[in-house]
Image (cartoon, helix red, strand yellow):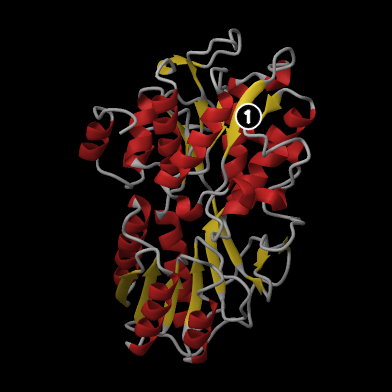
């Protein structure tokens, strides 16, 4: 089924969100103009604050930004916060003290970092939120990210198709599905979940899908997403949460797992492997034989991690939503260059509201990676084509053991 059909059916994408509390609204507003801060010229220092080195993608992001910015004639200083909000605030303060005329921040906690970016703004620096929106502050000038709801749409699409839900799968015997959302302090997480839930909720309503934990029902709301969140996107925490679900599941079949991140997917797989050694990736879920208790569930993911490439190649994971992060670095550098040339960066996308202001926003396109692509899907080697990993690393990935 084509993605456009899902988008039309869900009536979403990034425009017109109407979520409450921590989920900020998106609205078509001004495209910038009042956001240029202080002076910025070629050769100036640009500070880069990334959340952690522990995640493969943030190492790639940091390297991409340094490469792009230095090629454009700027100096760079890169800091990693070890997933600590307080450390990130210190990093940002240090970057500005070192003379950074702009700071690029991929926040650990989108709210906690607010005072630090306000100090940066007060010090004359331009503030760019990178991938994750910084909330409840006037200090954010620009935001560069991916189409967040598309991630959830792609994940839900895979589940709907593999379970044959549109043709009545689960009507006679409801399919068990476990659902996870991202970290409770990441402002992207509810958007990922909304994209998926808008598509999956009707199948809870019809009784085709059930959550064995009992947490998610047909009446579950997007704003309840933290009830199924995995703090810090942590693999071990995800495994613990899945352990509890597996206890409730007993010896019933498990059709699918909505996972928003590859490390969460890995934790889920380890839990399944421990609790139900009878279930095997060599026996994928089959909608024509849904009562097979040994069948391996359809498991989604995000980020194109090395372990995800391995698990998809050998059938343990159905797909991963891959974000070509080089696009973020290129767009961020373009914003910096335009400011240094005395221009006002102009976004042709919607702005996003962070609770205090409408932040001019650039949305990059993500892709779905699968072993055997059809339509708009990409093959697993797309991570090599886009420079995310080397061919050598890719070959290691497809020869590595699964669920490790």
* Residue located beneath label 1 in the image: 212
- Residue pictured at 55% horizontal, 33% vertical: 245
Q: Is residue 129 left or right of 62 when viewed as pictured? A: right
Percent x, y for residue 71? 30, 68
The quarter of the picture where the C terminus appears is top left
Foreground pick, 25 / 344: 25
Residue 271, image x and y in percent?
Answer: 43, 32
SS at mark 1 in the image: loop
Q: Is residue 283 left or right of residue 292?
A: left
In the image, 339: left or right of 70? Answer: right
Foreground: 81 or 73? 81
* x then y, percent, for residue 190: 62, 52
The x and y percentages for residue 389 are 29, 44
Who's the residue at 68% across and 38% down the image?
216
Counting labels gives 1
In the picture shown, does residue 80 fall above or below 156? below
Image quadrant where one finds the N terminus: top right
């Amino acid at each position: 089924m084509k993605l456009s059909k899902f988008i039309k059916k869900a009536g979403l994408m990034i425009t017109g969100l109407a979520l409450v509390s921590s989920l900020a609204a998106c609205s078509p507003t001004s495209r910038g103009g009042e956001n240029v801060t202080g002076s910025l010229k070629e050769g100036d220092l640009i500070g880069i604050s990334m959340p952690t080195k522990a995640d493969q993608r943030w190492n790639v992001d940091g390297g991409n930004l340094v490469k792009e910015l230095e090629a454009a004639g700027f100096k760079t200083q890169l800091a990693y916060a070890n997933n600590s909000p307080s450390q990130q605030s210190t990093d940002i303060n240090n970057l500005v003290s070192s003379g950074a005329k702009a700071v690029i921040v991929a926040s650990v906690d989108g709210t906690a970092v607010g005072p630090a970016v306000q100090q940066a703004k007060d010090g004359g620096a331009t503030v760019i939120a990178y991938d994750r929106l910084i909330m409840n502050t006037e200090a954010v000038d620009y935001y560069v990210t991916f189409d967040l709801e598309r991630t959830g749409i792609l994940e839900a699409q895979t589940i709907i198709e593999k379970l044959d839900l549109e043709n009545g799968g689960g009507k006679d015997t409801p399919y068990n599905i476990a659902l996870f959302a991202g970290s409770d302090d990441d402002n992207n997480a509810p958007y990922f979940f909304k994209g998926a839930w808008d598509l999956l909720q009707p199948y809870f309503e019809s009784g085709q899908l059930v959550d064995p934990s009992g947490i998610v029902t047909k009446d579950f709301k997007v704003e309840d997403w933290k009830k199924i969140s995995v703090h810090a996107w942590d693999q071990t925490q995800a495994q613990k949460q899945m352990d509890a679900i597996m206890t409730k599941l007993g010896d019933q079949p498990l059709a699918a797992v909505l996972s928003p991140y590859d490390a969460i997917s890995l934790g889920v797989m380890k839990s399944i492997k421990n609790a139900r050694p009878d279930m095997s990736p060599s026996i994928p879920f089959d909608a024509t034989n849904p009562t097979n208790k040994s069948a391996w569930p359809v498991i989604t993911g995000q980020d194109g991690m090395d372990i995800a490439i391995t698990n998809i190649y050998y059938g343990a994971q159905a797909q991963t939503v891959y974000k070509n992060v080089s696009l973020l670095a290129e767009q961020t550098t373009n914003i910096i260059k335009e400011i240094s040339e005395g221009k006002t960066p102009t976004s042709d996308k919607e702005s996003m509201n962070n609770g205090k202001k409408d932040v001019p926003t650039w949305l990059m396109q993500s892709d779905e990676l699968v072993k055997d692509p059809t339509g708009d899907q990409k093959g697993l080697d797309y991570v090599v084509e886009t420079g995310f990993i080397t061919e050598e690393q890719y070959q290691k990935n497809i020869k590595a053991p699964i669920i490790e």
